[in-house]
Amino acid sequence: QVQLVESGGGLVQAGGSLRLSCAASGRTFSSYAMGWFRQAPGKEREFVAGILWTGGKTLYSDSVKGRFTISRDNAKNTVYLQMNSLKPEDTAVYYCAAKECYACLSPPRYAFDYWGKGTQVTVSS
């Protein structure tokens, strides 16, 4: 049973930083892709960033490129999302997700298999 537990959300002023963590358990994740998604009130959930557990290749949405960094710590089975230069429009519930990805050359943006419960990020102006 895959379990994903997010932490690190909170309230921050515009221009500030937060680091989200996703603790993954229940599998060996070497053949997985991990992703961060977000959903703001009244909007659809959207892809933010993804990483291949093996090799570390990353992918970002245009809205966060250059401001957010996704990374993973193999020893801790944890994926991080470092968020800098935060804007009010980054306010959302952020979800960690995992997907089996044996032959992936790049992190996918869709069809993730497992999801965490989310952590709230609020950016005040």
Image (tube, rainbow, N blue to C red):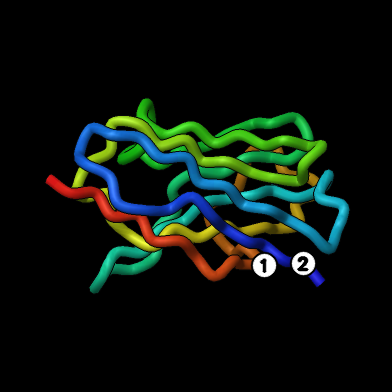
Look at 35% across and 38% down and name the residue there. 64
Could you say which is closer to the camera, residue 65 or residue 125? 125
Identify whether 93 is placed above or below 62.
below
Which residue is the site of mark 1? 113
Task: Locate residue 38: give its quadrant.
Answer: bottom left
Check disc 2 and report its element: helix, strand or loop.
loop
Q: Are marks 2 and 1 in contact (CB under 8 Å)?
A: yes
Residue 79, x across and y down, in percent: 64, 44
What residue appears at the point 49 percent right and 50 percent down from the top-left corner? 8
Q: Tell me residue 103's x, y (percent).
A: 79, 45
Q: What crowding class fits label 2: few (fewer than 14 Cα within 10 Å), some (14-19), or many (20 or more)?
A: some
Instruction: Tell me which residue sits at (77%, 42%) in the image.
Output: 76
Q: Residue at x 69, y 40 (%)?
A: 52
Residue designated by label 2: 2
Quadrant occupied by the N terminus: bottom right
Q: Quadrant of residue 25?
A: bottom right
Question: Which of 106 and 82 lies nearest the eye of the viewer?
Answer: 82
